[in-house]
Image (cartoon, coloured by chain):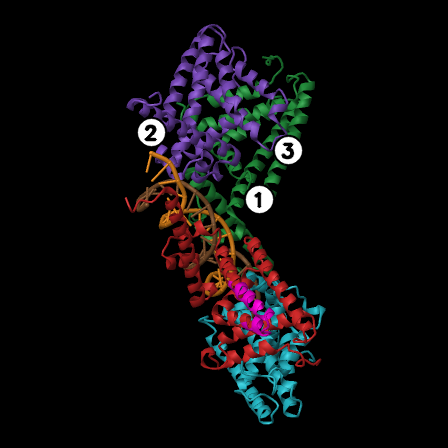
Chain colours: A red, B cyan, C purple, D green, E orange, F brown
Amino acid sequence: MGNQLSSSERIREKKKLFLQREQRIIDASLELFLSEGIDRVTVANIAQRAGIGKGTVYKHFLTKNEILVRIMLDYERSITTNLAAGIAQTEQGDPGAAAKAYFNSRLARPELDRLVQHLEVRLDEAEDIREQMQQLHELRRSNEQALEDMIQRQIDRGVLEDVPPRYHYLAAWALAQGAVELCFNKSWNYHPDSDGLVDFITAIGVTMGNRGQYRKS
Amino acid sequence: MGNQLSSSERIREKKKLFLQREQRIIDASLELFLSEGIDRVTVANIAQRAGIGKGTVYKHFLTKNEILVRIMLDYERSITTNLAAGIAQTEQGDPGAAAKAYFNSRLARPELDRLVQHLEVRLDEAEDIREQMQQLHELRRSNEQALEDMIQRQIDRGVLEDVPPRYHYLAAWALAQGAVELCFNKSWNYHPDSDGLVDFITAIGVTMGNRGQYRKS
Amino acid sequence: MGNQLSSSERIREKKKLFLQREQRIIDASLELFLSEGIDRVTVANIAQRAGIGKGTVYKHFLTKNEILVRIMLDYERSITTNLAAGIAQTEQGDPGAAAKAYFNSRLARPELDRLVQHLEVRLDEAEDIREQMQQLHELRRSNEQALEDMIQRQIDRGVLEDVPPRYHYLAAWALAQGAVELCFNKSWNYHPDSDGLVDFITAIGVTMGNRGQYRKS
Amino acid sequence: MGNQLSSSERIREKKKLFLQREQRIIDASLELFLSEGIDRVTVANIAQRAGIGKGTVYKHFLTKNEILVRIMLDYERSITTNLAAGIAQTEQGDPGAAAKAYFNSRLARPELDRLVQHLEVRLDEAEDIREQMQQLHELRRSNEQALEDMIQRQIDRGVLEDVPPRYHYLAAWALAQGAVELCFNKSWNYHPDSDGLVDFITAIGVTMGNRGQYRKS
DNA sequence: TATGAATGAGGCTTCATTCAT
DNA sequence: AATGAATGAAGCCTCATTCAT
């Protein structure tokens, strides 16, 4: 009788399996998007790679786009978590911590960051998933607010250049965004693993708005 | 007899018309890509907007991808021209001129720059147009070489931080790339026209590798 | 000991519950077909509305079509009952009673009558349920025979026009059929509740084959 | 040079071929709907039977539903034409002409009439083709008006029973509708070709509202 | 016994490309 | 030389039915 499960235990077990499979779909999609390119991935591919039937995918996601947006949300949430930790450190006296955390989490898996960027363009005006895109935007907006507050304090303390706070974080966002692209751009004689460029850029990101560095052009 | 054209004149005339029509196809494609989004543009749309038949498009371009790659090449060539002028100025004593020229030309029409970035992802592994993609990469490589040389001289003169020269231009590329994305990212409370952010970023781009600013993290 | 049931009582209890659930499935199907339209009803919908699992539906009916055909049979049986009562009355001296009973039972719930008509078309050549369709046809055939006999007697008595008896009941069937459609046809400026049209048509149905009304065209 | 066609002649020729092919699609659809049943006909079937590619169907019709609605409109227009002729005759002194024309045109190809009835149910709430359904309803509404006027005059002349005019034509519609169903209903021992039932019903249809026949039930 | 997750055949539609005129 | 009708591969999604728990 030891292996008998109560009814509620069995239900919980089932839910866990269901969620695991959902994760398998996400993982399979990610692998395929990264290895094949967004265009060349079909729902059939995903199902096959996840080891399930095509129809099963639709038990977890109403449309293909919902898979894509889910990938985006998962990623954005992980960024948020890291950023929040960095902001906390900054508030405790390490001025560069937030920027560093931000750059590090975006450049930790640049291929994923880039995938998310491109998914976003693709989903820009998708009719389904409007709601999830809203969620995404709100997530970012809350990050934005947290950054704005933190930066304002750094400005007040004289650490950062006194420009509108968003200048600082938007410039950081832009640099990170570009750094990610850089890792994949085939035109450049550049392979991210082989040298200190990422550190160089991160250092720029960390210091770029510091007081005294910026002069009106 | 004044309106009689010699055989070679007629041939030249025809070639001119042919080239004009080719440009019309490019222009129509561009307008559509920018207004409708890459996904929603079909060859039929392009032909209609260009005012010609669908079949005629295929007299000018062997595949749809050839149109896309052509847009990329045209754009990259215009960047090259501007950059070359900037480099020349830098060599004549204005240290920031190259960087400034580069940022200005990429941010002059950010929507176009961004389109080209996204086209590049789409064409990443396209079987046709491999050759043209090669051309594109070579164009960039020659720019790279020119930058490398120029930057080395700036380092030698003590203007720029002494790191591998590519650090400087790749960081600039990344920042420009990100600045372009920034203009379109819907999550940010940001509208490029309304403030000095672009100038702020450009200023960072111009000064970011200057000696004394970079400290190993 | 009062709540102890004997084995056979328990079996009977179970059967009763089983039949109740079967009726719940039928009812749920009917509600959905009427409210959503035949096309938009899935087995999943039915199960949900019946408050049971999808798999359970298949314990009661081998295929979806069996549910549909069951609805048809139930309906046809209720018509049969009413018609039999009407025929009995006619035999007892009220000549229009059978026709009236027939029209009344079909027009009592026109939406249901119409649903059955449309189900019939859908099930026309379904491979499964051939047997049940046979049952349906036999039910009707027995009604037909009863009508045929009754009408023949009315003809013999000089009440009805002397044409083949089936002319009378088929014409009545046709008029009833059409009257039902009429209630739902969106093209007509007609709302069944608002006037005496149904009575008018029923009156025609009751009198239409009476002697002296029909003249060869 | 005799087989040389002018430019405009060739364009006209092309248009004719295009329309012919459109008709081939309609014809193929009709044949299939009638022989296989509405459910079992796919766009692929239609294309195959029409001897063209699947994609070509979509050069002529935006969606599958547009084919269906086109069949309905074509049919309704032919009814309209016949009815108009019948009404004209009635106005010229033949009281039953309109009803007879109406019944004859609906019962001339009962299988087609029935198909149209069932298409209508299927297309009831289709999102595309709303416009065409509007056309259909308007076509019927104009028929309705013509009938209303004509019937009112017959009532005024004492030919028809004095009930609201729509009673007359709606009853006729219902009877015709039912008669069509009758031809196909497999439950009845009835084969339309073999006897005078259609005439019997038509005669009822022609005389059913005549003065003196109707008595309140 | 009841369940509902899993399945995959099959439907509709799009669109780059071809080719006869 | 220019055209656009024709094509069909390929994609997304639905849903009746099965079957392990």
Q: Are marks 3 and 1 in contact (CB under 8 Å)?
A: no
- Residue matched to label 1: D129
Q: Dot 1: within a 10 Å radius of its alpha carbon, few (fewer than 14), some, or many (20 or more) residues? A: many
In the image, taking residue C183 as reference, residue C53 lies left or right, namely left
Q: Dot 3: within a 10 Å radius of its alpha carbon, few (fewer than 14), some, or many (20 or more) residues? A: some
Q: Is residue D97 above or below residue A28?
A: above
- For label 2, the SS is helix
- For label 1, the SS is loop
Magenta stretch in the rendered image? A78-100
The dominant secondary structure in magenta is: helix
Q: Is residue A94 magenta?
A: yes
How many discs mark residues in the rendered view?
A: 3
Which numbered circle lies on residue D141?
A: 3
**Please, which residue is most extreme toward the bottom here?**
B157
Q: Is residue B160 above or below residue A206?
A: below
Instruction: Determine the chain carrying the residue at label 2.
Output: C
Residue C65: tell me if it is visible: yes
Q: Is residue A52 magenta?
A: no
At label 1, the amino acid type is: Ile
Residue at 45%, 78% (x, y): give it: A193
